[in-house]
Image: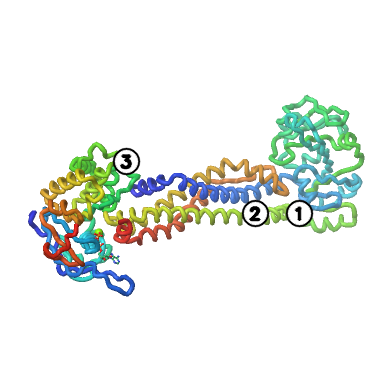
């Protein structure tokens, strides 16, 4: 305990230097925790997004399949159009368990977000949509009164942010129409929480795209049959079949390559932090050459000096670890914002999953770093010979 | 008990290598010191004073000859055992004080106890601080102290382990004459309680105030008449 105080007071002697070093360690830890947390969080969020989707397969108009997939995941359902006939054509396929047509539209609303402006997703759906989505439930209200009604159902967040409830009216920008809100969905923690749902027919009419769809969501009786199913659809030239597990894999691949890049940045940060720690401690050892010699003269053994210098390293690393974890936790929102901007597709749930486990491991990692980077300076100090040191000061 | 020999050196040698040359910093020194004795070691620069002090203080290994401190023959000991002897028998004070500037007076004084893994007895420390006239300054960081008070702190630190020999290399070199005299007075009080004190100095006045003067020249003890008293 006394050694601890001694070490602590030594660090206090050069406050700004100690502080900068601690800062370096903190940044390295924060980056590491954020990255590892992101890794776990992103996969979990993506998996849950895909699972909540309910569809195993999506049929869209031909185009870049991944672009289409990410659009679907973000509730925009691939903005290329396909003919409604195709839906009627495949709906009787024997392998299909459930099937639902989708028509997504985007509209820019300058009033959104208190005047900042933003896009609103409109999603035209039929009743089968609810059957396909296991966790879509009504928070209040219910289904549309008719196939062609001027009615809307709001996603949870859409209702929250617009402060609307059942019975209120909304309009669509640039369209001469007023819709009555008949229902509000519960939170699903997917992108569709922000969407406005309309009856499919109404959507086609309002946006003037009669007979068109942007996608078809399908749940197969047996997912193993997917390749046979795909083959049967192959002759229809204008469409493509996308399996969600494939999409998940591709997105994860994309994320992984980004991750490797960021990981190398994290390792550089850690490396720099280690060098910083070693440098700081070595400098303070050399500055205190005489002091260390004197400590030996008044009874300190090699191992006492070793312990003392090592303790200083550990204090720096521990404080760095604590600050770093705090930064990672509280800076998590910022990281998330950044990630959402950078990543090709950001799932709806929290992207950063900072678990106690993760913190403990990162913390242990830092302590190990501290132990390692303290070795050399501590050894250097311990092997200083008192007489030479005292003489050099005469 | 006070006349017991606390230190005995016979034909003590310390040779250093400087390149291919051998420097005979001490070349056969005989010396006996009794408990409660204050002696001074004088001699021109390079005569071996500091070397002798380092050997007495168990800071360095003996090249040849014998050196007994208390009942221990230290000439043959390795560093790890020398530390033990040092902790139990030796108190050091230095011309430049060498205190730890960020610690308080009390913390500096306690340091040897921490290294010796001994319990810290607050009352003992206070008594010790009283003895060196620092009882009202125990909480002050030593960097704020005057030179005299720094040396008093150094003395208290040297005494805290209850040593048998106090080794002082130029203890008053950096102090004003008046303060130096006070320190000497303190030494006398301490020696009356049974502490042997060895002072290496260029200061003849200080030396003459001690009970015995050892003249060193070229690593050997010489009679007073033969020493180059250029100072
Ligand atoms: N580590 C060393 N390596 C080589 N030579 C040394 C070493 N230490 C001391 N010497 C030499 O030993 C001799 C005695 O040195 P010492 O420091 O004991 O003299 P001193 O009497 O204390 O001198 P001063 O009055 O200047 O303090 C000197 O010639 C010195 O250069
Ligand atoms: Mg000297």
Q: Is residue A7 left or right of residue A52?
A: left
Mark 2 C-beta to ligand 1 under 8 Å: no
Instruction: Name the mark nearer the viewer: 3 or 2.
Output: 3
Determine whether A188 is above or below B20 in the image: above
- For mark 2, name the chain: A
Q: What residue does disc 3 label? A: B144
- Counting from the top left corner in percent of width and height, residue A145 is at 83, 30
Q: Quadrant of ligand 2?
A: bottom left
In the image shown, does B230 or B148 lie closer to the viewer? B230
- For mark 1, name the chain: A
Answer whether residue A125 is visible to the viewer in this image.
Answer: no
User: Do the CB atoms of the residues marked 1 and 3 lie less than 8 Å apart?
Assistant: no
- Same chain assignment for discs 1 and 3: no
Q: Is residue B196 left or right of residue A318?
A: left
- For mark 3, name the chain: B
Q: What residue does disc 1 label? A: A223
Determine whether A145 is above or below A357 in the image: above
Q: Residues within 10 Å of mark 1 (few under 14, many from 20)?
A: some
């Amino acid at each position: 305990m006394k050694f601890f105080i001694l070490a602590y007071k030594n660090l206090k002697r050069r406050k700004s230097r100690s502080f900068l070093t601690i800062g370096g360690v903190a940044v390295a830890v924060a980056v590491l925790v954020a990255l590892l947390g992101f890794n776990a969080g992103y996969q979990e969020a993506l998996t849950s997004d895909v699972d909540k989707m309910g569809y195993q397969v999506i049929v869209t108009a031909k185009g870049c399949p991944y672009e289409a997939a990410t659009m679907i995941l973000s509730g925009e359902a691939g903005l290329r159009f396909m003919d409604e006939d195709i839906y009627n054509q495949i709906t009787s396929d024997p392998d299909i368990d459930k099937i639902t047509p989708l028509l997504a539209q985007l509209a820019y609303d300058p009033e959104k977000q208190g005047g900042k402006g933003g896009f609103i997703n409109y999603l035209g759906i039929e009743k089968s949509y609810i059957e396909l989505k296991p966790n879509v439930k009504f928070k209040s209200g219910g289904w549309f009164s008719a196939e062609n009604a001027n009615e809307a159902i709001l996603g949870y967040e859409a209702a929250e942010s617009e402060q609307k409830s059942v019975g209120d009216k909304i309009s669509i920008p640039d369209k001469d129409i007023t819709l009555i809100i008949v229902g509000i969905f519960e939170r699903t923690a997917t992108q569709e929480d922000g969407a406005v749902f309309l009856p499919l027919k109404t959507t086609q009419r309002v946006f003037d795209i009669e007979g068109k769809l942007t996608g078809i969501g399908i749940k197969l009786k047996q997912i193993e049959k997917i390749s046979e199913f795909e083959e049967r659809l192959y002759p229809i030239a204008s469409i493509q079949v996308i399996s969600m597990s494939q999409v998940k894999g591709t997105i994860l691949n994309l994320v992984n390559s980004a991750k490797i890049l960021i990981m190398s940045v994290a390792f550089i940060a850690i490396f720099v932090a280690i060098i910083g720690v070693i440098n700081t401690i070595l400098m303070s050892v050399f500055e205190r050459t005489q002091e260390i010699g004197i400590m030996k003269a008044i009874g300190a053994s090699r191992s006492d000096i070793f312990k003392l210098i090592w303790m200083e390293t550990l204090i720096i690393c521990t404080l760095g670890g604590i600050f770093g974890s705090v930064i990672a936790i509280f800076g998590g929102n910022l990281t998330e914002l950044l990630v959402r901007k950078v990543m090709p597709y950001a799932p709806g749930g929290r992207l950063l999953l900072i678990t106690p486990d993760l913190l403990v491991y990162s913390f242990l990692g830092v302590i190990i770093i501290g132990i390692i980077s303290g070795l050399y300076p501590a050894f250097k100090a311990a092997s200083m010979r008192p007489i030479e040191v005292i003489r050099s000061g005469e | 008990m006070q006349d017991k020999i606390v230190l005995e050196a016979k034909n003590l040698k310390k040779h250093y290598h400087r390149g291919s040359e051998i420097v005979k910093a001490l070349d056969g020194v005989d010396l006996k010191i009794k408990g409660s004795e204050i002696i001074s070691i004088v001699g021109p620069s390079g005569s071996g004073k500091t070397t002798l002090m380092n050997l007495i203080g168990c800071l360095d290994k003996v090249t040849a000859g014998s050196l007994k401190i208390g009942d221990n023959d230290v000439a043959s000991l390795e560093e790890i055992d020398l530390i033990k002897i040092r902790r139990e028998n030796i108190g050091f004070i230095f011309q430049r004080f060498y205190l730890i500037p960020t610690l308080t007076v009390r913390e500096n004084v306690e340091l040897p106890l921490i290294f010796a893994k001994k319990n810290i007895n607050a009352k003992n420390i206070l008594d010790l601080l009283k003895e060196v006239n620092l009882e009202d300054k125990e909480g002050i960081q030593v960097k704020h102290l005057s030179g005299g008070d720094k040396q008093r702190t150094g003395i208290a630190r040297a005494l805290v382990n209850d040593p048998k020999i106090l080794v002082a290399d130029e203890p008053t070199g950096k102090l004003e004459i008046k303060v130096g005299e006070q320190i000497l007075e303190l030494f006398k009080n301490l020696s009356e309680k049974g502490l042997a004190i060895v002072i290496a100095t260029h200061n003849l006045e200080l030396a003459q105030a001690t009970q015995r003067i050892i003249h060193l020249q070229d690593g050997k003890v010489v009679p007073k008449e033969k020493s180059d008293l250029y100072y």
